[in-house]
C-alpha cells in the first residue's frame, strides 16, 4: 500500500459546504483540515490529467484510467484509507474528545474523562457517563492535535497528555482582498469585492495520504488542491498506517478480555445516516466490521454539514451531517462477539455509512481500563 505525501508550494484555502457567490457573500473563512473527499478528488484529477484529457476520461476510452479512477458517474478502484496531518516531520492526530484540554503552568495539556456507571434513577437510555475530575477551567478540544506516539501512549495507558498542538501553532493566516472579473471582458465587476483567509504552514507541513488501493503516482509531481486550485507537490512512499505493535495488541487483548469494553476514536470525520448514530444502530447495538457492540456512551463533537457541488449533475450535492474527527464512542462487546474480530479493528477500520473509499470515518479501536 502506497502513501502519498502532499506539501503546499504556497498558500492554500479550503472551502466548506456553503456555495459562494461573489457579491452575495463577500467574506470566506474556510476550513482546516480539509475533508478527505477534497484530497481524494485532487489526486483523482491529477492522475486523470497526467494520463489523458478530461474529454477522453468522460468517454471512458482509457482502460487503466477507468480502472483506477472510474467514470464521472462512478468511482474506480483508487481508495484512501486515511489522510493525516504532519508538521516538522511529526505526524499529528486529533485530540480525542473524551479528553479535556486546559492550561497548566502556561502549557496546554489534556486529562481523560472517566467512564462510570451511574446507578441513580435517570431518564437517559444508558447509565454510562463520562466524568471529569478537573477543577480547572477547560478549553475547547477541537482543532487540537497530538503527536502520534503521545496519542498512542495516552490511549494505551489512559493517561494525561502533557503536550498539545493547537492549530494556531501550525498555521499562519494571510488575508486576501480581491474583486471578481467578468469572464468575457476580463474587467472588474461592480459590487463583487471579496475577502478570504488563506493559510500557510509555519514550518514544513502537509498531509500523508494512506491508500489501500492505488496506481503509481511516481511520475506525477504536482496536484491542485482546494480553493483556487493551489499547487501542492506529490511524493510517493511505500508504507502503511499502523498504530499498535504486537506487544501492544497483546495488552489490548488482555484488557478487553477483562473489561469487555472498548472505544472507537474517529481520526477522520464520519457520515452517519442517523445523525449522531450510524445506520447499523438498532436497539442499543451497532456493528463495525464483523463485530457487534452495545452502545454505552460517547464524546461526540457537534456535527457539521457535508455537501459540495455535483459537477456531473451541475447542482449542489445532497447535504448530510458529518461527525467531526476526534469523536469517541464507548461500547461493550455483545455476547458471541469474537475478540479476534474486535482486534482486527484495532489498527484502523472505517466507521462510517458513506465515503469509506474517500477516507471518511477512519477509526482506531482502544481498550478501556
Image (spheres, rainbow, N blue to C red):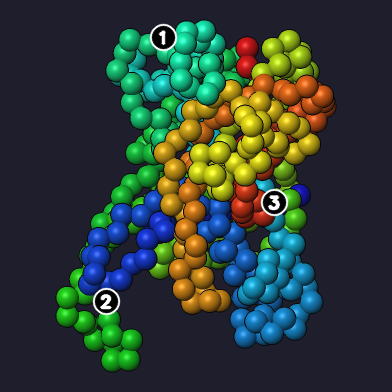
Secondary structure beneath label 2: strand
- Could you tell which of marks 1 and 3 lies nearer the N-terminus? 1
Secondary structure beneath label 1: loop
Against 79, residue 262 (above or below) is: above
Residue drawn at (67%, 69%), measured in percent from left and top? 74
Of discs 1 and 3, which sits in the foreground?
A: 1
- Could you tell which of marks 3 and 2 lies nearer the N-terminus? 2
Q: Position of residue 78 (x, y in %)?
A: 71, 60
How crowded pointer 1 is (Cα within 10 Å; few <14, some 14-19, many 20+) is rated as: few
Classify residue 171 by image quadrant: top left
Side of 13 relative to 56 (left or right): left
The residue under label 2 is 180
Side of 163 relative to 252 (left or right): left
Secondary structure beneath label 3: strand
**What is the number of the mark on residue 264?**
none
Residue drawn at (71%, 16%), measured in percent from left and top? 260
The residue under label 3 is 211
Amino acid at each position: 500500500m502506497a502513501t502519498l505525501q502532499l506539501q503546499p508550494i504556497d498558500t492554500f484555502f479550503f472551502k466548506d459546504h456553503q456555495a459562494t457567490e461573489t457579491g452575495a457573500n463577500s467574506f470566506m473563512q474556510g476550513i482546516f483540515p480539509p475533508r478527505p473527499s477534497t484530497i481524494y478528488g485532487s489526486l483523482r484529477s491529477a492522475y486523470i490529467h497526467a494520463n489523458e484529457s478530461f474529454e477522453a476520461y468522460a468517454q471512458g476510452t482509457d482502460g487503466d484510467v477507468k480502472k483506477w479512477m472510474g467514470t464521472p458517474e462512478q468511482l474506480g478502484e483508487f481508495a484512501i484509507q486515511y489522510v493525516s496531518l504532519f508538521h516538522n516531520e511529526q505526524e499529528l492526530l486529533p485530540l480525542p474528545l473524551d479528553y479535556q484540554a486546559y492550561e497548566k503552568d502556561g502549557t496546554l495539556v489534556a486529562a481523560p474523562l472517566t467512564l462510570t456507571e451511574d446507578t441513580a434513577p435517570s431518564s437517559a437510555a444508558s447509565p454510562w457517563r463520562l466524568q471529569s475530575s478537573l477543577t480547572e477551567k477547560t478549553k475547547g478540544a477541537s482543532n487540537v492535535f497530538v503527536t502520534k506516539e503521545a496519542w498512542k501512549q495516552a490511549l494505551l495507558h489512559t493517561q494525561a497528555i502533557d503536550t498539545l498542538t493547537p492549530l494556531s501553532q501550525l498555521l499562519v493566516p494571510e488575508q486576501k482582498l480581491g474583486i471578481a472579473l467578468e469572464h468575457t471582458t476580463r474587467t472588474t465587476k461592480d459590487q463583487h469585492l471579496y475577502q478570504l483567509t488563506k493559510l500557510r504552514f509555519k514550518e514544513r507541513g502537509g498531509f500523508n495520504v494512506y491508500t489501500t488501493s492505488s496506481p503509481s503516482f511516481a511520475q506525477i509531481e504536482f496536484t491542485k488542491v482546494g480553493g483556487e486550485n493551489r499547487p501542492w507537490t506529490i511524493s510517493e512512499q511505500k508504507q502503511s498506517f499502523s498504530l499498535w505493535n504486537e506487544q501492544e495488541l497483546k495488552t489490548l487483548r488482555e484488557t478487553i478480555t477483562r473489561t469487555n469494553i472498548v472505544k472507537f476514536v474517529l481520526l477522520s470525520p464520519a457520515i452517519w445516516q442517523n445523525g449522531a448514530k450510524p445506520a447499523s444502530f438498532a436497539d442499543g447495538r451497532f456493528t463495525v466490521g464483523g463485530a457487534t457492540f452495545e452502545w454505552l456512551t460517547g464524546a461526540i463533537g457537534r456535527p457539521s454539514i457535508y455537501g459540495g457541488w455535483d459537477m456531473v449533475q451541475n447542482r449542489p450535492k445532497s447535504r448530510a451531517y458529518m461527525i467531526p474527527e476526534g469523536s469517541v464512542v464507548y461500547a461493550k462487546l455483545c455476547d458471541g462477539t469474537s475478540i479476534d474480530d474486535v482486534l482486527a479493528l484495532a489498527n484502523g477500520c472505517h466507521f462510517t455509512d458513506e465515503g469509506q473509499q474517500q477516507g471518511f470515518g477512519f477509526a482506531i479501536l482502544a481498550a478501556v481500563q
